């Protein structure tokens, strides 16, 4: 039998040997984060992606004791900022607030992408799913007697192509929500793409564009202030934030469903330890009552699911939106 001291030294040696065999990536996650972290938002400030990123950044900054900076890199329906994130070093210090557009719609809409939504990224967690809402410039609605979706469809059929439909960019969920609506109702509008929600909403409220299918969080304040008139939400259930606004199906467009979502991703090759830590800390932040209340008041539903769940979710969304793109015929060269 081995003496106790010898057995102790042998056990210690075994532990040291095992530690030496650990992947470098695993050890790299031990002190994370050791410096400031950047979250790239591939759309302008003021939109829902920006709102989600700033909520997450503020809470992670408190938890980590490091600055978490939001960097807006807009352009090409989210492709510019997403491509930059894909090229970043996979060390956890550059993250992406990905969207339904960048990771589920764009692969079907764009002939060529400057990134691979699957191979170039490691999913971290879904932050918020949100409904879109069909909303009109109030003066436009009043001028043409449009009080509900049925009135809008009647007007569109009588005036094909005369209504300007703003969107947050080619291939975004706001664009595809409108395309799906036109396909299902046999109507035609003129699509006017913008570089994000803020400039699109500004023009709708000013009357330069007539309507938009926008993400609810970025529109909520304007709806409450009477600057935008909501006709329907695009999800299968009403939004608790707008309980008096019907769903598209309730408004007469049976079978219509479209929604948006926003989630954190890291460049491919980021260590699982770092990914898991970010997910745990984001999920903890989203469970806090003040954070949940803040997001829910804007029409968002806090998530914080696991990397595996987020991966499966995105796969399903890609299939779903590919069918919508095919049905609508929307394409961007």
Image: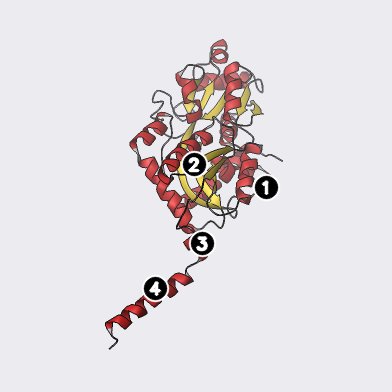
Q: Which residue is mark 3?
A: 25
Q: Which circle's residue, 4 or 3, is located before the other in the chain?
A: 4
Instruction: Name the residue tied to disc 4.
Output: 15
Identify whether 217 is placed above or below 209.
below
User: In this orientation, does residue 330 appear?
Assistant: no
**Local SS, label 3:** helix
Q: Earlier in the sequence, mark 1 or mark 3?
A: 3
Q: Give the mark nearest the N terminus, 4 or 2.
A: 4
Q: Secondary structure at mark 4?
A: helix
Q: Which of labels 1 and 2 is toward the front? A: 2
Task: Please provide percent x and percent y for residue 86.
Answer: 61, 50
> Where in the figure is residue 93, as x and y percent of width and height?
54, 49
Q: Earlier in the sequence, mark 1 or mark 2?
A: 2
Residue corresponding to mark 2: 67
- Dot 1 lies on which element? loop
Residue placed under numbered mark 1 in the picture: 114
């Amino acid at each position: 039998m081995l003496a106790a001291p010898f057995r102790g030294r042998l056990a210690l040696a075994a532990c040291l040997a095992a530690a030496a065999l650990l992947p470098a990536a695993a050890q790299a996650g031990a002190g994370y984060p050791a410096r400031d972290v950047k979250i790239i938002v591939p759309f302008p400030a003021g939109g829902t992606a920006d709102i989600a990123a700033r909520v997450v950044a503020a809470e992670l900054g408190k938890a980590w004791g490091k600055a978490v900076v939001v960097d807006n890199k807009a352009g090409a329906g989210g492709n510019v900022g997403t491509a930059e994130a894909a090229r970043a070093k996979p060390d956890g210090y550059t993250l992406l607030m990905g969207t339904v557009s960048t990771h589920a719609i764009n692969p079907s809409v764009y002939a060529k992408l400057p990134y691979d939504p699957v191979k170039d990224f490691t999913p971290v967690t879904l932050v918020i799913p949100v409904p879109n809402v069909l909303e009109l410039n109030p003066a436009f609605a009043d001028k043409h007697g449009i009080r509900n979706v049925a009135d809008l469809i009647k007007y569109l059929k009588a005036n094909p192509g005369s209504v300007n439909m703003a969107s947050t960019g080619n291939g975004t969920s706001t664009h595809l929500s409108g395309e799906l609506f036109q396909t299902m109702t046999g109507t035609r509008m003129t699509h006017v793409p913008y570089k994000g929600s803020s400039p699109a909403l500004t023009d709708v409220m000013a009357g330069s564009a007539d309507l938009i299918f926008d993400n609810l969080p970025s529109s909520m304040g304007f709806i409450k202030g009477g600057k935008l008139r909501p006709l329907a939400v695009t999800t299968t259930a009403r939004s608790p934030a707008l309980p008096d606004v019907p769903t598209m199906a309730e408004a007469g467009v049976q079978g219509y469903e479209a929604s948006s979502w926003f989630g954190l991703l890291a460049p491919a090759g980021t260590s699982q330890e770092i990914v898991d830590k970010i997910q745990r800390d984001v999920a903890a932040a989203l469970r806090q009552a003040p954070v949940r209340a803040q997001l829910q008041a804007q029409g968002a539903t806090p998530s914080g699911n696991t990397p595996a769940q987020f991966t499966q979710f995105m796969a399903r969304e890609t299939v779903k939106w590919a069918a919508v793109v095919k049905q609508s015929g929307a394409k961007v060269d």
